[in-house]
Image: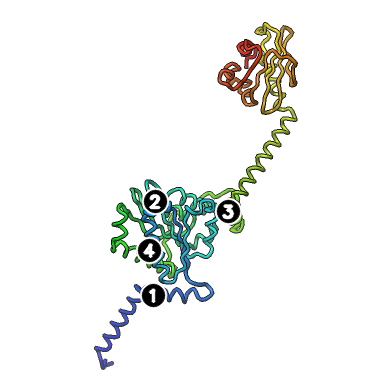
Amino acid sequence: MKIVCPGLFIMILTLAQILKMLYNDSIWVHFWHEKLMYGKGRGYMKVNIYYGGRGLIEDPTIYVINKIQDVLKEIRVSVSRYNLYEQKNGISMLPNTFKDADAVILAVSVEWFGIGGLMQIFLDSCWLYADKTRLKSLYMFPVVVSTAKGERHALEEIINAWELLGGRAYDGICTYAGNRAEFETNQEYTSIIERKAEEIYRIVSHKTNLLPNSINACHSDIPTTGMELTPQESEQLSVYVADDTFVKKQKEDVEQLSQMYKSILGQNGEEGSNYIKMFEKAFRQAECSTEAVCCIKMSDMNKTIVLEMGAKGLTCRYGEAEKPDLLATTTKEVVGKITSGKTTFQAAFMAGFISAKGRLDLIRMFDRIFAF
């Protein structure tokens, strides 16, 4: 077949190559592709940003995520930002915000070492309360800006944590900003950040896949929490954990139950009978050269041990004595340490754990008469 106009044919081929290149590189083509793909019912792409820094005005991480946020909003991406320092009491509820998100950005500042406490609490909450099925389809892009050493270590920590959760972690931004003013005014750095934001958009809109890794492959072998909870139960549990009033009430209820059972044990006399038997067993008649009545009052139990000793032996009971020769006041814990041999009566008195009045010479004799 004879080509009538070879120049026109070459122009058409060249134009086709240019259009193909523009399709691959133009962010606006991706925008319309994403709009058509999600449709009217789905809405635009949604990206959540979780900032784990302290919110200081000189933090360069804020500058980076502001730039990313501006670029994403310019191409009609719905961006929600969560500053963890503003939601310290509600961090456990933040995994519930993954529901409608297509991607998340985890941003941290490395001020001296590691990703910081707030981001660690957030990741712990993801492990405890997030819907793991939802995490598998969620893209994560880390943003790590360091003003000290260690940005690479922090980046690896975030990526490893997210992969352990079962999510998909992609390359984000990892940089050092020793001089904040120089970093923020450098146009080349700004251009790199903006291109990275556009790359985030392309990856999510095209649903780019990752090659498998060992962490995801062995995820089933990683131990989980003791209770198997549905996503709805995990969400409700995270709400309860974040409610300080609920947690405080639960602690009060546990304390009341504890006191109730302690009271029941005391009424049954189990601990009391043990103390009586211990004193009777430890009594040494040969060392008892005096007639005396000693009372040991346990103030936290409202009980008093009465020891009547002399030549005829020892009588040990709970009750009261009219005129004891020695009245000692202490706690059940101290009596327990004395009867178990962890301390002596005189040592506890010298340390201030026992207050006494009456014949103080009996304190010195006490440890000879009772050998615990």
Which circle marks residue 154 in the picture? 2
| 33 in relation to 211, above or below | below
Chosen colour scheme: rainbow
Q: Which residue is mark 1?
A: 28
Q: Which dot, 4 or 3, sits closer to the camera?
A: 4
> Which numbered disc flags the more N-terminal residue, 2 or 3?
2
Instruction: Report the side of 132 relative to 71 (left or right).
Output: right
> Which numbered disc flags the more N-terminal residue, 3 or 1?
1
Give x and y (percent) for residue 39: 50, 75
> Which numbered disc flags the more N-terminal residue, 1 or 2?
1
For marks 2 and 4, give the CA distance: 21 Å
For marks 2 and 3, give the CA distance: 26 Å
Instruction: Report the side of 243 relative to 70 (left or right).
Output: right
Q: Callout 2: helix, strand or loop? A: helix
The residue lying at 44 percent from left, 71 percent from top is: 76
| 190 in relation to 41, above or below | above
Q: Which residue is mark 4?
A: 67
Q: Is residue 330 visible?
A: yes
Pointer 2 with pointer 3, Cβ within 8 A: no
Give x and y (percent) for residue 244: 59, 49
Q: Which residue is mark 3?
A: 238
Q: Which dot, 2 or 3, sits closer to the camera?
A: 3
For marks 3 and 1, give the CA distance: 39 Å
The quadrant of the rendering that contains the C terminus is top right
The residue lying at 30 percent from left, 52 percent from top is: 178
